[in-house]
Image: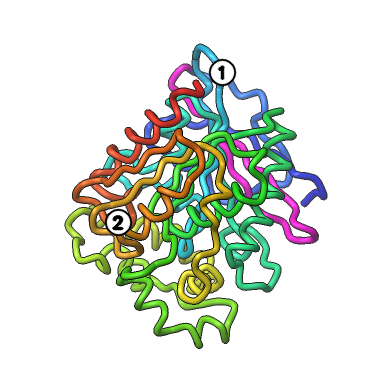
Amino acid sequence: MTDQPVARRTVIKSAGLGIGAGLASGITSAHAQTQPDEIRSDAYWAHKGSVKLAMYRKWYAGPRTGIQPVLFLVHGSSNAARSSYDLTVPGKGEYSMMNVFARYGYDVWTMDHDGYGNSESSGNNSDIASGVEDLKAAMDVVMQETREQKIHFYGTSSGAIRAAAFAQAQPERVLRMVLSAFTYKGEGAEEIGRRQKNIDALRANPRRKRDANMIRSIFTRDGHPGIYDPAVPEAIIAAEMKFGDTVPSGTYLDMAANLPVVDPAKVVCPVLMVRGEWDGNSTNDDLLDFFRQLPNGDRQFVILPQTAHSAGYSKNRYLLWYVMRNFLVPEL
């Protein structure tokens, strides 16, 4: 491994393929031929002090017109970046948001947060504050590689809280932001109530159990398992178990004991808030309270029908992509 972020360049077909497993310390296939139906991918290291954080990038390499805006995807509490945003579910259609938005014309980035996936661990519990520091380190790489000083952000679940907290800390870096499955105060939310019963255990250990059964429970806990293809959690399990059966506990602890961690009055960029109608991590009242306090008049609140917490994994994921694309389009 080098001491600077290093790109691993590959070229892959766009028909639902994820980024290849593993990271490389050198550059391979840097001059591979690009075809109109191809998506190009890179992998990088960011540095948060001595901790190396894995980053991934995809963009459409075929003919295009206009600018290629940067979109950064922030993962949630239980899965790393690639199973969150570059998932392959054989025979089940497209589940990679990276592929989808690369085809839309975006330069799409994501990262494994501290203690997740291919990233190293600082030994902390990777709470929201730690996630903000991760994103600051990632922005150094994004700005170096793209020359863009201000980019779009999307976050889901605790990733939405991370993204909003970053926008609060560094508003000059955020162009437009999409918050999906966000939680503000968590009042009246069933899933937050369940986590509050485990506060002592979450405080006692910087990591928590995240085995195959826990991953499956993400798709049943809101009471509507039929809105997901059962192959999806199995694909996530296959992608995630190689990293072990625990993940950092910090975001769960923050959502159980420390909400709110974001002040909506300090999130000054345009914001799209997206909520599944059956999402147990929040209520309409909780999110509308946050939404009404946002200072930028360029804001939208969308409820996705027949959708629960994990909108990007659902059979209705196309609705999420549609509202995102239309919100981000003014910058294209």
Number of dots carrying numbers: 2
Q: Does the CB distance between marks 2 and 1 fall below 8 Å?
A: no
Near-viewer residue (260 or 178): 260
Near-viewer residue (231 or 145): 145
Task: Provide the residue span drawn in magenta.
Answer: 36-57
Task: Identify which residue is drawn at 43% across, 65% down.
Answer: 185
Give coordinates of residue 105: x percent, y percent: 48, 24
Task: Identify which residue is drawn at 53% across, 22% down.
Answer: 61
Measured in 3D between alpha carbons, the distance from the residue under mark 2 to the one under mark 1, in whole angstroms, is: 36 Å
- As shown in the figure, which amino acid type bears the numbered disc 1? Ile
- What crowding class fits label 2: few (fewer than 14 Cα within 10 Å), some (14-19), or many (20 or more)? some
Marker disc for residue 284: 2
- In the structure shown, which secondary structural element does the residue marked by tag 1 occupy? loop
Mark 2 or 1: in front is 2
The residue tagged 1 is: 67
- As shown in the figure, which amino acid type bears the numbered disc 2? Asn
Q: Can residue 162 be found in the magenta stretch?
A: no
- In the structure shown, which secondary structural element does the residue marked by tag 2 occupy? helix
Give coordinates of residue 96: x percent, y percent: 40, 41
Residue 25 left/right relative to 62: right
Marker disc for residue 49: none
Determine which quarter of the picture holds residue 51: bottom right
Determine which quarter of the picture holds residue 131: bottom right
Determine which quarter of the picture holds residue 29: top right
